[in-house]
Each structure stands twice: as C-alpha cells, then as structure tokens.
Image: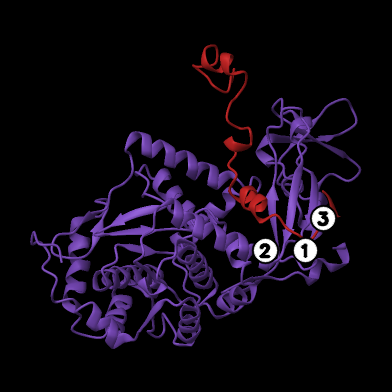
Amino acid sequence: MGAENWDRVTLLFSAGARPLKTARQLTIADLLLANRFPPSLFQAYEVPGDGTLKPIPHSLTLGEITPGRNVIVQCMRNTDIEALRPTEVESIRHSDHPVTAMADYEYSHETKEPEHRLHLVDSATMREIVFGKIADFLTKHDAPAKMVAGISGGGDSSSIVQGVSRYVTAQGIDPSGVTCFTLVMDPLWPESAADRARSLCEEAGFTHQVLYPDDIAGLLEMNASPSELWEEFSRSYGPDSSHFFGTFFVNLAGRAVCSTTGARHLLVGYNREDLMAELLFCLINGRRPMPYPVRRTGEVDVMMPVWDVPKHLLDSCYPKFSEINYSERVDSTSMRRSSIYYLAHCLDALVPQMSLSLMAGVRTLMDDLDGWQRLSSIPGTPLVHTGHGDPDTQAEMIGLLNRYFPQWKPGSDQAE
Amino acid sequence: MEANATAVPTTTDTAALTAVMTRTLPEAGVDRMTDPRMEETLAAPALCAHL
C-alpha cells in the first residue's frame, strides 16, 4: 500500500473506530517493530557530529529528532543478525483470492539461511486444514460415538460440525450419536443463528436440540426462566459479566445434555488464544494451569479440538460470518478479561509460534509433574471450582443461583 | 520488509500448511542453546551463558 492510502485504513472495535498513528507520529520503537525487531533489544543515539553519541529514548517520533542529526539504533546484544534476518520475508501465494496469511518463520537455521515465509491462503484451504485437524484430534483422543457440542450457528460452529462429521464418516460411526445443542435466549443468544445451526446439523446427520428458555429451565430443573436469572445476575454483578455467565451457562447446559444423552464428552471451540489467555493468567498469578486440550469437568471430558488453531485462522474459514459476528457484537467486554486477551495476542505479534510453543512446553511439564489444576466439585451442586476463590463471596453467588436451581443442595455431600 | 509474492501451483498441500500452523519453536530448531555437550556440562548453571 502506498503512503497515500494511510488515511484509508480504519481500525474498528465493537466500541467504534479508533485512529491509527500518522506517519509523523511513528517512533523509533515503531520502526523497529515494523521490521520485526523488539525495541528492548536496542538503544537509540543521536549523532551530534562531534565524535560523541547522545542516548535518546526510542519513544521519540521521527519529528522529534533534532533537525539535521542522524540516529544510530544500536543492538545491545551480540545478536546474530545473519541467522535471523527478520525483515526478509517471502510471500507464497497459494490462491488467487487469499483471505489470510500464515506465518512460517525460522529462528534457528543451522546454516544461517533462514527462510521466512508468509503463506497467503484462501478460506477453502483454511476450512480443509481446520476440518482435518478436528478429525485428527478426535481420532488421536479416541472420541466415542456419543458426543455433545454446543453450537451457535456461526463460523466456529460450522467448523466443529464439519470436522466432527469428517471424523464420524471416517470411523463409520452413526452420526445421530452426535448431539448438538443451540441455546436461544435474548439478548445473549439471538434466535437468528438457530436456523443456521439446525441446517448444519441436518446436513451432517447429527441430532440437534434448540433449547429455548423454557427448555433450558426444564433441562436444568430451574424454577424460573434463565432470562430472569440473567437479569438478577447482571443486576448483582454488572452487565460485563455476560461473557462469564454465558460460558458458565453453555457449560452447564452442555453437561446436562451429556447426562440426558448418555454422553461423557463435550466439544468446545476454544482456540489458541482462548487457551493462551487463560494459561497466561494462571502463570502470571502463580496458579497451576488448567488442563488442555481435554479438561475433566464434573463427569464430563471437555474436548478442545481447535485448541492450537489461532483465532484469526479459525475466523478466516468463514470470513463473512466473522464480519457479521463482530459488527453485531454487544459492546460488553469485561475490562480485565479484555486485557488478558490483548496480552495473549501480543505474545505472537513478533514471533507467531510463541504462544503455541509455550502451551506445548507447559503441557509437557504439567504432565511430567502432575502439576495441572484439578477442578473439584462444589458439593450438592454441578459447579466446579479451583479453590482460589473467597469462600464468602462464593457462598453468596451459590445462594443466588440456588434460588433458581432449587434441586441443588449446597453443602451436602451429594453432588447433583 | 521484502514481501515478494511468489506464484505456486494451485494444488495446495494442506498437510504441509497444517504442519506450518502447529510447528512449535523447539520443533523448528530452538530445542537447544548450543552444542549439547556444552549445554549439559559447562552451561548447566547458566543455560544462556549470560555474564
């Protein structure tokens, strides 16, 4: 893109558009990042011309450099630039209509001839890759004939359905043993997506349950509509709790569908950065990591077949869905959750393999040490916890939930 | 940054691209710091040999 197109690029969030820096506002650090160099590896100096060097912060913009002076940006370690050459990237075009770029960078080439590539791939190829990965994951983990998956009807759901379909076909499994469910409850889960979910499942031969508020209440033995619960919950904990409430509720409903169908495996669409954000949060707070890509939750094994697929590549399977999804998304972010996601995505910004490598290493380490965080049941309820919470606030929330789930007997030895 | 688009045959090797997507840094050569003999003995107290 030519510099004349600088103003044509719009940065868009659910909260609206935000400006990009202008060319004049770019700092020395920004230039380093644009060349795939971490700024912390460098010290900048102005060259006055009298034989001395004047150290300057690399936060200076190009416009702030003393007029007429040159600048040296000195690497502060004996970095072997010939072995890294991060600016030499070859684009490999795999399609006439690519929608995404998959990084393929080398950092440790024996002969110091790194070949950094960007594979430009179209959505059909991405779907092939993701469907195949899901099928391979299920094969590797001996997924049984009976499985449950919560699907919204969006792009990720389509990938899960197609991947599972590929698996059951290859294994000669009766597809009707796979039960997908879709929750419908305004404003969290609009009905519009349920039709799409239904046709996806019909195509694959899966059993599909659309659960409206009354169905959800029946399934979970509630004495009131889940909408009423959400209203009270959001009043008590704020509307930004929607992501947490929604995830909790889908998990609870999914495990209940497992129970009614005799399944013990629940498929979820957690992607690479979902897991990395959670892992990062656990590690920086000195907590044991939560297990992945299979997590025992109550009586159910939660399986994460796209745990290692980056979100942007998952989204690129169905770019249209993503576009609609984010334009319709409610501007409710939960500030700390939003920050940890930002941090997780930062990890791969210069080194796209960083998060997966950390996840793979931590997984091996936790397996070796038996160090994973185990989720223990809260007696008398289907809830599970890590034990990090404050008992009083936990009791308060269980009390609120218990008013809507009268079958729960918190504190009793009998898990519901 | 150089980014010369190279045309390749349209038959895409999805298996190779899948491998690219899930290749970790150790699998791509960042599995040791130096000659393993040095790493295991000389460098054991300070793997990065930082002075």
> In the displayed structure, does residue A188 sit left or right of residue A298?
right
* Chain at tag 3: B
> Which amino acid type corresponds to the residue marked 3 in the rendered image?
Val
> In the displayed structure, does residue A407 sit left or right of residue B35?
left
The reply to whether the C-beta atoms of the residues labelled 1 and 2 are less than 8 Å apart is: yes
Q: Position of residue B10 (x, y in %)?
A: 78, 61
What colour denotes chain A?
purple
Q: Which residue is mark 3?
A: B8
* Chain at tag 1: A
- Give the red chain's letter: B
Give the quadrant of the C terminus of chain A: bottom left
Disc 1 to disc 3, how far (Cα)? 8 Å
Residue A102's image quarter?
Answer: bottom right
Q: Residue at x 8, y 62 (%)?
A: A412
* Chain at tag 2: A
Q: Position of residue A33 (x, y in %)?
A: 72, 47
